[in-house]
Every structure is written in structure tokens, then in C-alpha cells.
Image (tube, helix red, strand yellow):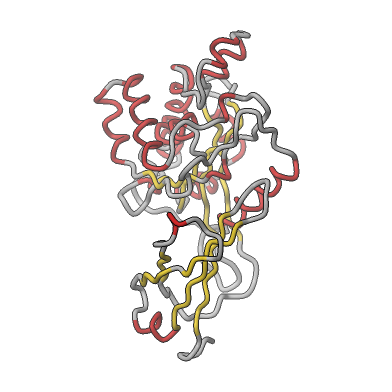
């Protein structure tokens, strides 16, 4: 256990994909101050590393002490649900061998069919909830989700960047076969966090496909964007190059849905809070970049570390 005389040292790095991580600076916070202000945010100045550019000289870091309780030993089990994004303009152009449609923009939105696929997903998990007598307005619990002294089980929903090529209505039969007792459905509804790639098609799929999911209700339960969830980058793939950063990502996705769904249908989607703090700056890779398998595996390690 830390002592009141201890000092917490914080080192901040700028993580780079292809080059060495840059050290930004260091901050020190006396532990007795954290303990006295437990649960409250404490902001302190970051002492910048030698050679850091001048525009960063006023940087700071914010920390808070949540608990002094020791971390419980033993494995932690978490359930992760992967959701495929709907058909995008890139997918449609690629299928039609329409080169102009593929390269006339970056970060392609969902097509009408792609939005319908997301709507079908939303309708199907709600219908399955009714059939199973599960009220998705009420927090779910099941033996598989209860906390025990040995392990903590929770779940996350992560819309993935794999192309959705299935037709409408294909999910429900698979769900019935895979989950005849409703246990996994309850796990899906009890997911504590929902993450998405910052690419527009993934954000749109999440907003439509998971509309009314308990984990997306209220400002304290946002949709969290992670740059590590972006699609594997192939050389020349226009659909994997972003156009929007941070605060512009959510509004753009919602605007595109409003154009497709109409103002009234899209209005409820505007209530979903989008946490885009991880998608700052140029979070994507350049058009000519080709990711290697090792780089993709490194991203996967980062994703799993986040979900832990």
C-alpha cells in the first residue's frame, strides 16, 4: 500500500505506429494530496521533455485517486460482442467495379442498404428480447454475469470494421441457434461499454444498430471511439482514410443519417453522446501506407488492453 510520503510519477508519451514513441513530459503528484482529494480531479503542470516543441509548453495532466483497495488476484472474464458495419459506398462501388465511386472520397458512409442492415439488427435484438421476455429497459443479470470472488464478468459491444455482406434478416436465426436459453442475449443487453472505429460507416452502424441499447443512454454512457479499431489499412484504400477528427466525427455521422432517414427518425440518435477523445488529430494512416501483420497485431494488443 502506498504511503502518505510517496510521490506518484507520471510519464506522458506520444505513441507512434512506425517510429519510436516520443516522450512528452513528466508530472509528480504527492500521494497525500491524492488521498486527501480522493475521487476529485487534480490537475498539475507537465514538465516538458527536452526538445518538445514550444506549442506544448503549457500542457498539463489530470489524475484522481479512485481507491486504495488492492487489485483482486485471479482471472477476469469479459464477453465481447463484435458487430459488423453495414454496406458502405465503397463496398457498393467495389462490387460494381465502379472505380470512380471508390476513389472520389475518403471515409465512405453507409449506403441505403447499409442503413437498412443496421436497422434490421436493431429490430432483431429488440424482437428477440420480447420473445425471451427480457425487458431491455431494465438492467440484466444472469448467473454468467454475476460477480464472484473468483472473477468479474462483464461485456462490451465493439462494432468491427469487417464488411457486412449478409442480407437483411440473417441475424435472428443464427441468434436462436446460438442462444436458445437467452443467456447471451442478456449478456448483450448488459454490456457496460460500446466502442467503435472512428470511421463514419462504423459510427453510423453503431448509432442505428444499437439504438436504445442500455449502454448508450445518457451523457454518462457514451459511444467511445478508439483509433485502434479502424480497418486494416491497405495501400490505396480510400475507405480507410479518415476525414474528420474528434468533435467533428459524431456530428458528421449523425448528419449523414439525417439525410438518409429524415429529421424525425434521426432526431433520437442525436441524444447519444460520442466520446471522441482518442480520435484527435490525424488518427488514420496515409493513403499510400500498407499496414503489416505485426502492426495489426500490435493494435489488437492495444484493443485488448483497453477492454481489460
Relative to 70, residue 157 above or below:
above
Q: Quadrant of the C terminus?
A: bottom right
- Residue found 40% across the figure and 80% down from its top: 34
Q: Which residue is at the front of the view, 8 or 194?
A: 8
Question: Residue 5: where, in percent of width, then height?
Answer: 48, 91
Image spot of residue 171 (x, y percent): 55, 29
Q: Is residue 90 above or below residue 232?
A: above
Q: Quadrant of the N terminus?
A: bottom right
Q: Is residue 135 visible?
A: no
Q: Quadrant of residue 261?
A: top left
Coordinates of residue 26 in the picture (x, y in percent):
51, 70
Q: Quadrant of residue 237?
A: top right
For residue 280, above or below residue 55: above
Residue 61 visible in the displayed image: yes
The number of numbered discs placed on residues in the rendered structure image is 0
Q: Position of residue 182 (x, y in %)?
A: 52, 44
Question: Residue drawn 42% across and 37% down?
Answer: 210
The residue at the point 33 percent across, 27 percent down is 255
Query: Residue 47 versus residue 207: which sits nearer the camera?
Result: 47
255 displayed left or right of 284 = left
Task: Give the vertical position of 118 relative to 144 (above or below).
Answer: above
Amino acid at each position: 500500500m502506498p504511503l502518505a510520503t510517496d510521490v506518484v510519477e507520471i510519464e506522458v508519451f506520444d505513441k507512434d505506429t512506425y517510429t519510436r514513441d516520443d516522450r512528452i513530459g513528466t508530472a509528480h503528484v504527492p500521494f497525500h494530496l491524492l488521498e486527501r482529494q480522493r475521487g476529485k480531479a487534480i490537475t498539475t503542470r507537465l514538465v516538458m521533455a527536452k526538445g518538445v516543441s514550444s506549442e506544448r509548453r503549457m500542457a498539463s495532466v489530470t489524475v484522481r485517486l479512485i481507491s486504495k483497495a488492492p487489485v483482486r488476484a485471479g482471472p477476469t472474464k469479459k464477453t465481447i460482442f463484435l458487430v459488423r458495419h453495414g454496406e458502405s459506398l465503397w463496398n457498393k462501388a467495389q462490387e460494381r467495379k465502379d472505380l470512380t465511386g471508390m476513389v472520389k472520397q475518403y471515409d465512405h458512409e453507409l449506403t441505403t442498404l447499409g442503413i437498412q442492415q443496421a436497422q434490421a439488427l436493431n429490430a432483431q435484438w429488440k424482437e428477440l428480447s420480447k420473445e425471451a421476455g427480457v425487458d431491455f429497459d431494465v438492467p440484466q443479470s444472469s448467473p454468467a454475469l454475476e460477480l464472484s470472488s473468483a472473477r468479474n464478468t462483464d461485456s462490451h459491444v465493439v462494432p468491427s470494421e469487417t464488411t457486412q455482406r449478409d442480407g437483411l434478416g440473417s441475424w435472428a436465426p443464427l441468434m436462436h441457434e446460438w442462444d436458445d436459453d437467452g443467456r447471451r442475449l442478456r449478456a448483450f443487453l448488459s454490456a457496460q461499454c460500446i466502442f467503435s472505429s472512428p470511421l463514419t460507416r462504423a459510427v453510423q452502424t453503431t448509432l442505428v444498430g444499437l439504438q436504445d441499447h442500455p449502454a448508450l443512454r445518457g451523457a454518462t454512457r457514451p459511444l467511445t471511439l478508439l483509433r485502434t479499431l479502424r480497418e486494416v489499412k491497405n495501400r490505396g484504400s480510400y475507405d480507410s482514410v479518415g476525414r474528420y477528427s474528434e468533435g467533428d466525427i459524431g456530428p458528421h455521422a449523425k448528419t449523414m443519417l439525417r439525410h438518409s432517414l429524415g429529421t424525425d427518425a434521426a432526431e433520437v440518435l442525436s441524444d447519444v453522446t460520442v466520446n471522441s477523445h482518442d480520435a484527435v488529430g490525424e488518427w488514420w494512416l496515409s493513403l499510400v501506407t500498407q499496414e503489416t501483420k505485426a502492426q495489426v497485431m500490435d493494435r489488437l494488443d492495444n484493443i485488448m488492453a483497453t477492454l481489460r
